[in-house]
Image (cartoon, helix red, strand yellow):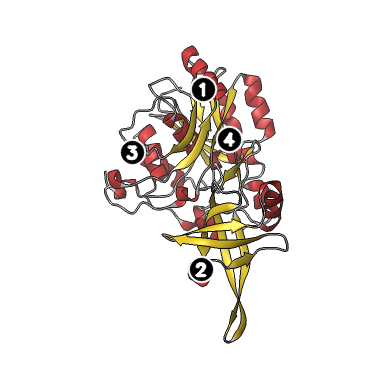
Amino acid sequence: MKLSDFDFDLPEGLIATRPAKPRSSARLLVATPTRIVDRHVTDLLDWFRPGDRLVLNDTRVLPARLTGKRGRDTAQGYQEAKIELTLLEPQSVPGQWKALIKPLKKIREGEEVKFSDDLSATLVAKEEGEALVAFNLTGEDFDRALNAAGSMPLPPYIEAKRKADQQDKADYQTVWAKNLGAVAAPTASLHFDEPLLKALSEKGVEFTYVTLHVGAGTFLPVKVDDVSQHKMHSEWGEVSEGAAIEINTTKQRGGRVIPVGTTALRLIESAAPAPGVIAPFLGETDIFIKPGYEFRIADALMTNFHLPKSTLMMLVSAMMGRERMMQVYDHAVAERYRFFSYGDASLLLPQEP
């Protein structure tokens, strides 16, 4: 398989920069092996059955983007430089984080960057384009200061059009977000609001929560033409014992297990030791799902529309077949669906309902 096999033309105007309001009013493309149906997210009630189980990622997005200043005494006097920092992942030492710094060349090891009156960080080390920084606060004090000073780390294709603002702190977070640690949202889940969750529950649809802390690597481009040579980024996830029992029970009863978003799908597939069976899981996953992969747990997938030539295009092609997904995306472009993180949704059903 070549990278070009997963390319398609996307008009710039179809990239969404704000979400639909209310969340569940977004459009929904339903794809089966033989049909493509145009609906809205509220119509999920027509496609889910009593006994189906939705798997939801309960990660909470950090306001991980910080802008501050580095000061330095020079021969020309005291000089400041603007520094932008994006958190990547916490380290075992309290207060230390891996981060991206822009521009990295303008800061030296041992120098401090101030982001607010309360929050600052010192550069500990540089390695392969990333930085190790130590913040002056830890625990709840750090969380409060970060929430005040930080902004949501919107994807690059949105940041290129506008900067994150206060509204994104609500928009770029699921209504069930719980476990802090992601630097990108599980975006298919952004379409759910409390009325829709209530309606689905009343119909008999069940919910299981798992955690996958989405990392900045989710936006990294594929740089090899032979996709089998691509190395996936790793992300931390957890499937609790209770979650595994719920999913296994649904499989045994003949219900469908439907992850909401590629993050939830990647996690439950990582936790499956055999077809139809999931086990508790705690740790890193770098699973790469591409055409030819045989799904062990997921029976369908709700997801947004993805970037051309991305690993997520390969993942949805694994579920529906590459040619079928190209037909789906041709339809989505022709019907002017909104793409990417704040865009519309698709429900992919590899078996006719």
Can residue 161 be seen here? The reply is: no
Amino acid type at image mark 1: Ala
The answer to the question of whether label 4 and label 3 lie on touching residues, with beta carbons closer than 8 A, is no
Percent across and percent down for residue 227 are 30, 46
Q: Residue furthest top?
A: 253
Percent across and percent down for residue 203 are 62, 20
Near mark 2 (Cα within 10 A), the count class, few <14, some 14-19 or many ≥20, is few
Name the residue located 47 percent from the left edge and 13 percent from the top edge.
Answer: 252
Amino acid type at image mark 2: Pro
Which residue is the site of mark 1? 244
Which residue is the site of mark 3? 322
Task: Report whether 328 appears left or right of 258.
Answer: left
The answer to which image quadrant residue 325 occupies is top left
The answer to the question of whether label 4 and label 1 lie on touching residues, with beta carbons closer than 8 A, is no
Which residue is the site of mark 4? 41
Q: What is the spatial separation of the Cα atoms under label 2 and label 3, in whole angstroms?
A: 39 Å
Name the residue located 30 percent from the left edge and 50 percent from the top edge.
Answer: 4
The answer to the question of whether label 1 and label 2 lie on touching residues, with beta carbons closer than 8 A, is no
Q: What is the spatial separation of the Cα atoms under label 1 and label 3, in whole angstroms?
A: 30 Å
Amino acid type at image mark 3: Arg
Percent across and percent down for residue 241 are 54, 23
Which quarter of the figure is the N terminus placed in? top left
Q: What is the spatial separation of the Cα atoms under label 4 and label 3, in whole angstroms?
A: 24 Å
Which residue is the site of mark 2? 103
